[in-house]
Image (cartoon, rainbow, N blue to C red):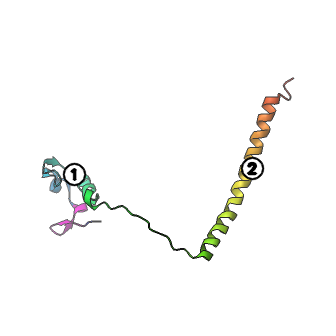
Amino acid sequence: MQTESSGGRHIEDLTDAELGGILSDPDTGKPERRTVATEIARRRRPAADQRNGVILAGVDIPFGDLVVLFVKAALAAIPAVLILVVVSVTVGVVITAVVSGNGSR
């Protein structure tokens, strides 16, 4: 976070009266009215030329750690699969009962 100051005070501590009024937009040079909140948001936002993307070239994970990760993921998936089976069987039984019409005659 930038801590630009005015007279030894942080921008977040300035009041609307100290910061407000007609100010010049540094990007366009046009005058505009700003409040403390809009000025803080503007100063925290990176400029268009400062936005850098990240390109991941590679990941170096030891084989043993990768095996442990996949084993943990497989063990963690078991309860989810059991819940899906119970829900699927329940929905299947309800649909079968509705379609076959058991008990309606």
Q: Which residue is mark 1?
A: 35
Residue flagged by tag 1: what amino acid is it? Answer: Thr
The image's mark for residue 59 is: none
Does residue 83 show up?
yes
Quarter containing the C terminus = top right
Residue 21, compared with residue 6, is above or below; it is: above
Q: CA distance from mark 2 to mark 1?
A: 57 Å
Name the residue at 20% across, 60% down: 14
Residue 34 in magenta? no
Percent x, y for residue 81? 71, 54
Q: Pick whichever, 23 or 77, lies toward us.
A: 77
Residue ranking furthest to the front: 57
Left or right for 3, reference 18: right
Residue 69, compared with residue 40, is above or below; it is: below
Residue 64 position by quadrant: bottom right
Q: Write down the region rendered in magenta.
A: 3-13
Residue flagged by tag 2: what amino acid is it? Answer: Val
Percent x, y for residue 82? 74, 54
Residue 95, compared with residue 85, is above or below; it is: above
Q: Which residue is mark 2?
A: 85
Residue 40, compared with residue 99, is above or below; it is: below
Q: Pick whichever, 12 or 100, lies toward us.
A: 100
